[in-house]
């Protein structure tokens, strides 16, 4: 059973590079001078920054004999870039992904599937998939878990300092000059534009160029009082330097452990919901070992440890019996139906993604 430290501040996007590099170097040590990653019992795992209970990788290696090279990223945009780079020809003429397991968000799973960059899972090798809640066996983006298995699910809303707000803020707060320089918006295309679309009363998956342009204009106006930040906003919330931040539920809950004045809210305009899922790149060197890790993660005690440490729902129904009551009762981790009704999954829009690409470029230029 994994022991959860009494105090920690990790984050779905929080950058703690030293620990991540340390894991990668230890795992990669025996590979020095190797010519082909297929020659070794190890997997290369690319995951969101600090999104894992600290002993989980060591426990997997102890039980399976498979070591893990663990690397991290801070956005789906970065994941796409690194996956593309990993697929380029390498010394010796080898081609194919250098990663065995990655954890994209739901809309990116769809894009990677449609572009044939990920492979179908061999569910016969993943029997613990039966531990998942039925809703996570039949997601809209991957019915039947043909290509993906949930790692964690949560929401995107606002983290804020309760000593500065008598009532929970709405998205309009990012236009309030009283908090200039003390507010952050996620530096990720669909999260930021989705928030602005919701603030304007639009569907965050709209394909109307006029609406998306209007959302970009609003974000540019908001940047006069705030900044784009996906990497350091948690530290700012904890220290009090940041009084309101668009953020991920798991991140804000972890920050709250360090500073009890922090709260999280889905504003009345609505919020975003996400599922980050394990998938295997199409040309992964060791897909069979990746299957073993997925099956390991789906063990109730493993999923429960990660749920408690990262402050997320893993979608593992069998794990819930092992969670403390305060986690089960937390409406941020397990939102009630009234909140779920106001949440939107980010859709993959195919060719219409270009509308968002162009709008986001304008926002970034103005930052």
Image: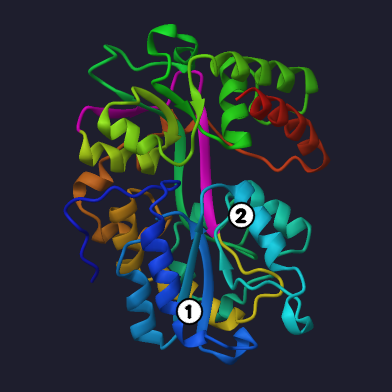
Q: In terms of depth relative to the viewer, which is nearer, 133 or 98?
A: 98
Q: Quadrant of the C terminus?
A: top right
Location of residue 201 (image quadrant): top right
The single residue placed furthest to the top in the displayed view is 177
Q: Tell me the residue at 37%/60% (across/down).
A: 18
Q: Please tell me which residue is depicted at 60% across the width and 20% down the height of the picture.
A: 219
Give coordinates of residue 16: x percent, y percent. Answer: 38, 53
Q: Residue furthest left?
A: 6
Q: Which residues are magenta?
A: 260-277
The residue at 48%/39% (across/down) is 230
Q: Is residue 297 visible?
A: yes
Element type at marker 1?
A: helix
On residue 28, the disc is: 1
Where is residue 57? Give x, y as percent.
38, 73
Question: Residue 183 occupies which quadrant of the picture?
Answer: top left
Q: In the figure, is residue 305 to the left or right of 116?
A: left
Asked if 92 appears above or below 102 in the picture, the reply is: below
Res. 342 visible in picture: no
Could you tell which of marks 2 and 1 lies nearer the N-terminus? Answer: 1
Viewer-nearest residue: 138 or 322? 322
Which residue occupies the foreground of this view, 30 or 260? 30
Q: Is residue 362 magenta?
A: no
Residue, disc 2: 79
């Amino acid at each position: 059973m994994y022991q959860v430290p009494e105090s920690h501040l990790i984050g779905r996007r929080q950058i703690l590079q030293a620990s991540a590099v340390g894991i990668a170097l230890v795992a990669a040590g025996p590979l020095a001078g190797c010519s082909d990653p297929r020659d070794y019992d190890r997997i290369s795992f690319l995951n969101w920054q600090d999104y894992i209970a600290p002993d989980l990788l060591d426990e997997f290696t102890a039980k399976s004999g498979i070591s893990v090279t663990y690397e991290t990223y801070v956005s789906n945009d970065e994941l796409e870039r690194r996956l593309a780079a990993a697929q380029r020809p390498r010394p010796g003429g080898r081609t194919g992904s250098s990663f065995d397991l990655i954890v994209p968000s739901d809309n990116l799973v769809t894009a990677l599937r449609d572009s044939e960059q990920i492979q179908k899972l061999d569910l016969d090798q993943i029997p613990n998939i039966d531990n998942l809640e039925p809703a996570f066996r039949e997601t809209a983006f991957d019915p039947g878990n043909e290509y993906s298995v949930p790692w964690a699910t949560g929401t995107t809303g606002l983290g804020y300092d309760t000593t500065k707000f008598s009532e929970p803020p709405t998205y309009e707060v990012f236009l309030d000059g009283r908090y200039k320089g003390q507010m952050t918006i996620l530096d990720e295309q669909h999260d930021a534009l989705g928030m602005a679309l919701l603030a304007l009363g639009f569907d965050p998956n709209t394909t109307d160029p006029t609406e998306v342009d209007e959302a970009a204009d609003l974000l540019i106006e908001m940047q006069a009082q705030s900044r784009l930040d996906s990497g350091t906003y948690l530290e700012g919330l904890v220290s009090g330097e940041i009084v309101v931040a668009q953020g991920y539920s798991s991140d804000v809950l972890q920050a709250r452990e360090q500073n009890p004045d922090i709260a999280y809210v889905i504003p009345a305009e609505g919020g975003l919901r996400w599922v980050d899922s394990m998938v295997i790149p199409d040309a992964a060197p060791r897909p069979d070992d990746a299957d073993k890790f997925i099956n390991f993660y789906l063990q109730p005690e493993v999923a429960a440890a990660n749920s408690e440490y990262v402050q997320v729902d893993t979608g593992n129904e069998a794990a819930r019996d092992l969670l403390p009551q305060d986690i089960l009762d937390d409406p941020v981790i397990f939102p009630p139906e009234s909140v779920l009704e106001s949440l939107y999954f980010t859709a993959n829009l195919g060719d219409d993604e270009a509308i968002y690409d162009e709008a986001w470029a304008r926002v970034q230029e103005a930052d």
